[in-house]
């Protein structure tokens, strides 16, 4: 899944949760102390969920940013090692693809 899709899904989840929260708030027109207590509890749960989701998103972003910075630093510090590694992986993938094509051509 690409970054745009992931972001869109996260925003959609938040919108749904906020809509549920707003629905619970608007349903306060219902009567009964138990209904009020239930709505209040549901609103508290949704608020906690939104707060936790925000924390997880912030932590994930910080961790991914740190990983990208670390990888970027490694590549800048070791450019020839990365060029050699990329070349080696490319050659290996080339052999695998060529072999698969050769095997498919020989099998009737």
Image (cartoon, rainbow, N blue to C red):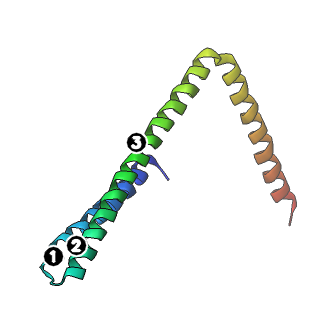
Identity of the residue furthest to the front in this view? 33
Q: Image point 17% across, 77% down: which residue?
A: 27
Q: Closer to the camera, 37 or 53?
A: 37
Residue 74 lies in quadrant: top right
The percent position of residue 63, horizontal first and vertical second, equals: 50, 37
**83 relative position to 107: left or right:** left
CA gap, disc 1 and disc 2: 7 Å
Q: Earlier in the sequence, mark 2 or mark 3?
A: 2
The percent position of residue 80, horizontal first and vertical second, equals: 68, 17
- The crowd level at tag 2 (other Cα within 10 Å; few <14, some 14-19, many 20+) is some
**34 relative position to 98: left or right:** left
CA gap, disc 3 and disc 1: 33 Å
Residue marked by disc 1: 28
Residue marked by disc 3: 58
Identity of the residue furthest to the left in this view? 29
Q: Earlier in the sequence, mark 3 or mark 1?
A: 1
**Disc 3 + disc 1, Cβ < 8 Å:** no
Residue 75 lies in quadrant: top right
Q: Image point 34% across, 57% down: which residue?
A: 48
């Amino acid at each position: 899944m690409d970054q745009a899709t992931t972001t869109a899904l996260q925003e959609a989840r938040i919108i749904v949760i906020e809509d549920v929260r707003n629905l619970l708030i608007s349903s306060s027109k219902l009567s009964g102390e138990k209904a009020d207590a239930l709505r209040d509890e549901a609103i508290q749960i949704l608020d906690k969920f939104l707060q936790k989701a925000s924390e997880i998103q912030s932590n994930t972003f910080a961790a991914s940013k740190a990983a990208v910075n670390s990888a970027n630093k490694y590549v800048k510090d070791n450019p020839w090692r990365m060029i050699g590694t990329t070349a080696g992986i490319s050659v290996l993938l080339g052999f695998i693809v060529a072999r698969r094509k050769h095997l498919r051509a020989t099998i009737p």
